[in-house]
Image: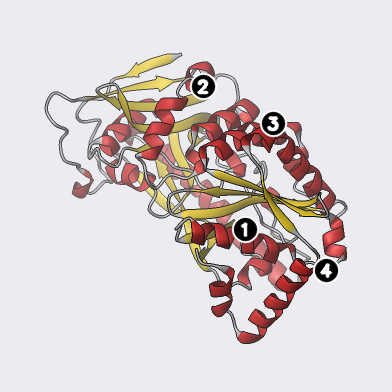
Amino acid sequence: MSTAVRTPASAGTATAAPASAKAPAAPEGTATSARLVRDPEVFGELAGQWDGLRRRSRSSTPFQSHAWLHSWWLSYGLPGRLRVVLVSRSGELVGAAPMMLTYTPLPTLVALGGGITDFSDVLLDDGDPDAAPALARALHRVARGAVVDLREVRPGAAAERLYDAWAGPRRKFRDSVCLELPGVSMDTMLERLPAPSAKRTRQKLRKIDKAGVTEHLVGPAEATAAVRTMLRLHELQWEGRGVTPEHLLPRFRAHLQRTVRKLVASGDAVLTEYRIGGETVASDISLSSEDMVCGYLYGAHPRLRAARLDITTMLLRHDAAFAESSGRGTLSLLRGTEPHKLRWQPHPVPNQRFVLARREMAPGLALHTAQILGRSLAAELVRQYAGGGGWMWRTRTAGQRSGNGRPAEGGARRTAG
């Protein structure tokens, strides 16, 4: 189902939005039109237009690709809840907000992707100055009776422009912290570390090379089978040590198999197998955007740990080389601040959370905000108590909450391997 959305020039008084939120008017005769897509089949047919817009939205990541979002919906979407807001000019998409309706318990529009998605965003044509205000007006219309909650927004994302253009109450919060390294080679990376740490890392790299580890880049035709192998290794790797349950479920496997094949073909993902004597002993999925490479998920055979091979160092060397050779300036370790990440001296970059509402939903926004702050306070108290030795506490993705209010379905590299 696709429904036209009337987007008048003014969608209400922006009581909480600054005057600077007003963008230049669109050229005369090229007004935007908006529509709401609720039918998953119609959403599935948008791949070409969607990815064309994504190429013109430079802050986007593979998590905003049609391959990722449509596959996620097939695995995790709830019937009747799809809400994809589209804005077009002269028949070409210039803005898109991939949302779904959930209840927290308030009716809430959240971004597609849930807990297995490290960065959420909208898409805006960078060459169209009216794209953000037009998408804000369309989403404002669709959000009647609901609160809009955009989680895990990376600094510099297109959603910041949507937030600035929003005509109504809005709140901004800090969300998960991501760790970032410069996109340089391993040799340059080691120059950033204290001499003793750099020396130990070079010893680990020599040990990896002495073990005869080779790298094999997986092509699109091999990707489906290679994802299956990676998840099998992932399960072996965490056997008896608390694997993230979502990673073992058929819906997660189906999502990755559908998505990675397409992203490898488009150049948005690199799937690497690490082999010893022709046998795959580890596998790694890296995603890339215009300015960033990020390691998403990996699996490694327990025998590598038994041989005391540093898996994190092996993977990071590969991702660093990819980032440098492709001219991408950032190597993201994604969400989580575990010790095995911190030893590389990364830069912490907090994601953002934007909560938006229409004027008549201001009480609902206040209630939703109170829930967010309450959960944040409770989490901080748990961290403080755990830090004081109250109980053994280990940061887990499964303990986070996804944008739709449910436990997160999984995540990227968050614990040492």
Circle 4: element type: loop
Q: Earlier in the sequence, mark 4 or mark 3?
A: 3
Q: Residue at x 67, y 45 (%)?
A: 410
Q: Hey, what amino acid is under mark 1?
A: Ala
Circle 2: element type: helix
Q: Earlier in the sequence, mark 4 or mark 1?
A: 4
Q: Are marks 2 and 4 in contact (CB under 8 Å)?
A: no
Residue that label 4 marks: 308
Circle on res. 254: 3
Depth check, front residue: 46 or 81: 46
Q: Residue at x 37, y 46 (%)?
A: 58
Q: Hey, what amino acid is under mark 3?
A: Ala
Q: Position of residue 17 (x, y in %)?
A: 26, 46
Q: Is residue 113 visible?
A: no
On the rendered structure, is 37 left or right of 286? left
- Which one is in front in this view, the residue at disc 2 or the one at disc 4? 4
Circle 1: element type: helix
Residue that label 1 marks: 379
Image quadrant assignment for residue 310: bottom right
